[in-house]
Image (spheres, grey):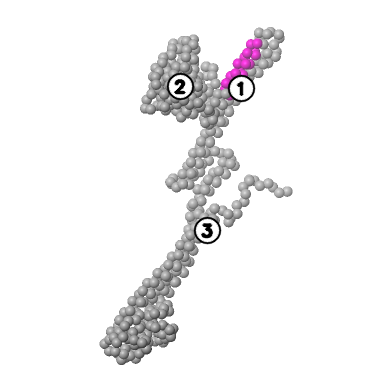
Amino acid sequence: MSSAPKNNEAPTRTWRTLGLRLAIWYVVVTLGSYMALAAILPLTVRSLADSEGQRTTESALGRYKSIVEAGGTDALRAIFDCHGDPQSSVAVRLSDERNVEIFRGSTDDASGHVAADLSESGATHLASRRAPMGWHVASSSVSQGRQLEVVLHDDAGSRMWSHARTASLWMLACGLAFAVLGALVITRRALAPIDDFANATRGIVDSGDLSLRVRTRGTTDGLDRLAALFNRMLARNEALVRAMKESLDNVAHDLRTPLTRLRAGAELALRGSGDAASTREALAGAIEESDRVLAMLTTLMDITEAETGAMKLDKRTEDLSDIAREAIELYDLVSSERGVHIVTRLSPGVLVSVDRTRIRQACANLMDNAIKYTSSGGRVEVVVTARDGVGVLEVADTGIGIAADEMPRVWDRLYRGDRSRTERGLGLGLALVKAIVEAHGGSVAVRSEPNVGSTFELRFALA
């Protein structure tokens, strides 16, 4: 019985891997460059050798021309009778104006054969024919209409050509070795970040540990920037998952109490012994707890919609002071009953582009918190101003304040500080305020001191 594979990863064929393809492309490009250089080098050397050989031949032609002009054919014949220049292979031909050969001489058999071959090829003059490799031809007119031609073999040029071909072969061999070695090194270094990506992703998939990160090298190349962005995405996902877990834990904890009360009320109604008043009271309590659960779930859905950008906002240019005034009017009666005095400083003409209903809801949540945690005889101040291109709404109270260690978490879902648990609440008001304001592109801030009071601030860009 065969065992099932441990993962769903398909086997990767070696010839299909990115590393091998990069290595092959590197070898092809590098070796092609070396081949081009190896081809250009001999051609360049040959061109230089031909030019140098032709200059040597023309120089020899000048010397023999001077001899002919000074001593005639006899002087030229005397030179070759003495075997000419022993350090060079040269042949000389002198012809009249009708191209009838007057004199031919050579220092060795090789030069004589080349001169004879060129002469027998049917050319009017030797210089009009292309000489074999390493041989050069030059001609010049001399006195009495005669033509002097010189055929010379350039040993230095031949040696340069031979050395150039040998150097080209060595260049190709070295180029192949460097190409293979370079391909191995470069592909390994280039693919290292991709391997890090794969290892980190595999580790996250296998273990579910979102704290794993891709190693960065502190460079500014594209792969390193991508790794940094990938790590930022992992950090954000880790934070979201942690927040979801905390929210689920808090929801489970906070729903336990109202659901227990709901069940107790239902059981009390069922056990009722015909007392209609007790039954109605139990059912009323059950309805109240049901409303509490529904409010919690509805608020959580609103926060999620705002944070994910799914909340529908009917943005219009509104006066922030008018919105604050509407929220204050909603809490006039509540503040009077609790003995809390409301003070307002609302500057007119603070125009912002917002959804009026949602911002009024956020302001109302701040008013509710401020009045709830402010003792009788205290004060709540609402201020709307415009400064530095920003519309600012502040709600300040003289309540119990917030401890310094609790300040960073007051905007979290379902978080309630120890001192705030004396009042009935869901722990979602400030989280909803933050989500709504940030959905409008604004920001929130809080300043507080225990037993002195708190100031919550909402900022919006002016329209």
* Quarter of the view holding residue 163: bottom left
Label 2 vs label 3, nearer the camera: 3
| Front in this rendered view, residue 92 or 234 | 92
Label 1 vs label 3, nearer the camera: 3
Which amino acid type corresponds to the residue marked 3 in the rendered image?
Ile
Any part of residue 109 in sight? yes
State how far apart marks 1 and 3 are (Cα). 65 Å
Query: For numbered disc 3, what is the local secondary structure?
Result: helix
Q: List x then y, in percent, for residue 301.
A: 56, 26
The part of the chain drawn in magenta is 280-297
Residue 216 vertical position relative to residue 448 in the rendered view, above or below: below
Residue 370 vertical position relative to residue 240 in the rendered view, above or below: above
**Was residue 284 drawn as part of the magenta stretch in this picture?**
yes
Image quarter of the C terminus: top left
Q: Earlier in the sequence, mark 1 or mark 3?
A: 3
Residue matched to label 2:
402
Query: For numbered disc 1, what is the local secondary structure?
Result: helix
Residue 62 vertical position relative to residue 246 in the rendered view, above or below: below
**Was residue 50 drawn as part of the magenta stretch in this picture?**
no
State how far apart marks 2 and 1 are (Cα). 26 Å
Q: Earlier in the sequence, mark 2 or mark 1?
A: 1
Any part of residue 455 in sight? no
Residue 166's label in the rendered image is: none
* Quarter of the view holding residue 392: top left
Residue 256's label in the rendered image is: 1
Q: Residue furthest left?
A: 70
Q: Residue furthest right?
A: 1
Neighbour class for label 3 at 10 Å: few (<14), some, many (≥20)? some
Which amino acid type corresponds to the residue marked 1 in the rendered image?
Arg
Left or right of 49 in this view: 228: right
Q: List x then y, in percent, for residue 453.
A: 43, 18
